[in-house]
Amino acid sequence: MVRSLVVIPTYNERENISRLVEEIQQQGPHFDILIVDDNSPDGTGELADELAANSNGRIQVLHRAGKLGLGTAYLDGFKYGLQKGYDYLFEMDADFSHQPKYLPELLAAARTSGVAIGSRLVPGGGVTGWAWYRKLISRGGSLYSRTVLGLKVHDCTGGFKCFSRAALQILNLPEQVRSTGYGFQIEVNSLCEWNGFKITEVPIIFPDRTLGKSKMSSKIFLEALVMVWKLRATKAERLVASPTFDTQAAADGGQFESSSAADAGFTTRRG
Ligand SMILES: Nc1nc2c(ncn2[C@@H]2O[C@H](COP(=O)(O)OP(=O)(O)OP(=O)(O)O)[C@@H](O)[C@H]2O)c(=O)[nH]1
Ligand SMILES: [Mg+2]
């Protein structure tokens, strides 16, 4: 059986986390869960420990000392999952904007192309509960980053993603990523596409959070606008081996221990 780990960063998500893990587990035996909690003042970390204690190892918890940011929470989660030998790793928010029912479809897509994302900006996808101006900012942000960085993926800022182990290792993702803040998703998408991966977009409906508080701010958003240009300037140094993606290698998911593209079933364009 393919083993996947759903990495969920949490900061004050006590109201959401119990029901979320329950719904994820209803999606089948493929999905283990890692909660990465940054010492949430509302006690999310303690609640996560209780959930883990009764889970037969299916729920695990990483505790960090304080609020260290979403990006680094994912990177720590990826490192943990790779060490534990998982074949696929997911990124998922705790607030139900990322609905567990899409996990199987994302996994199936990542088994074909190596990288899959839940997309609000392809036919069949969308957002509910956002005011028109928030939709406009989100769409505009994606279009802007896509254009500046030359990407094909439409939903550049979404954080519901699935990576094969091979993709993470070839991209050397935990070590390669530099942004800690909101630009994290954009940087990861760029690294994937610049290095030859096709990101499959699975349409998702993204409801706004109903419980708990948003951690998004206009300062974070403005930082991302500038960050896109800085990221573009680093493109030349971010190419790993210019792999052309081999779908069979991706379907075999996590079988590759080597970080070399050739060993993992990738062919290099530069010969
Ligand atoms: N561990 C950790 N998790 C975080 C941190 N910041 C945000 N999160 C979590 O990351 C996920 C996404 O954060 P959200 O606040 O939902 O951000 P958003 O989706 O852009 O904004 P809203 O949906 O409007 O709240 C949630 O599960 C948060 O609890 C952080 O610094 N550390
Ligand atoms: Mg959210």
Image: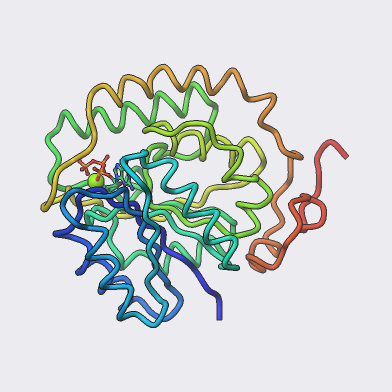
- Front position in the image: 221 or 143: 221
Q: What residue sits 77% from the left and 58% below the top? A: 265
Quadrant hosting residue 139? top left
Q: What residue sits 37% from the left and 49% below the top? A: 64
User: What is the quadrant of the C terminus in the image?
Assistant: top right
Quadrant hosting residue 164? bottom right
Residue 262 is situated, as x and y percent measured from the top left of the image, at: 82, 52
Q: What residue sits 15% from the left and 40% below the top? A: 130
Q: Tell me how many marks there are.
A: 0
Residue 148, compared with residue 197, is above or below; it is above
Q: What residue sits 56% from the left and 21% below the top? A: 232
Residue 13 is situated, as x and y percent measured from the top left of the image, at: 20, 54
User: What is the quadrant of the N terminus in the image?
Assistant: bottom right
- Front position in the image: 137 or 160: 160
- Front position in the image: 180 or 29: 180
Residue 55, compared with residue 41, is above or below; it is below
208 horizontally vs 8: left or right: left
199 horizontally vs 9: left or right: right
Residue 132 is situated, as x and y percent measured from the top left of the image, at: 14, 32
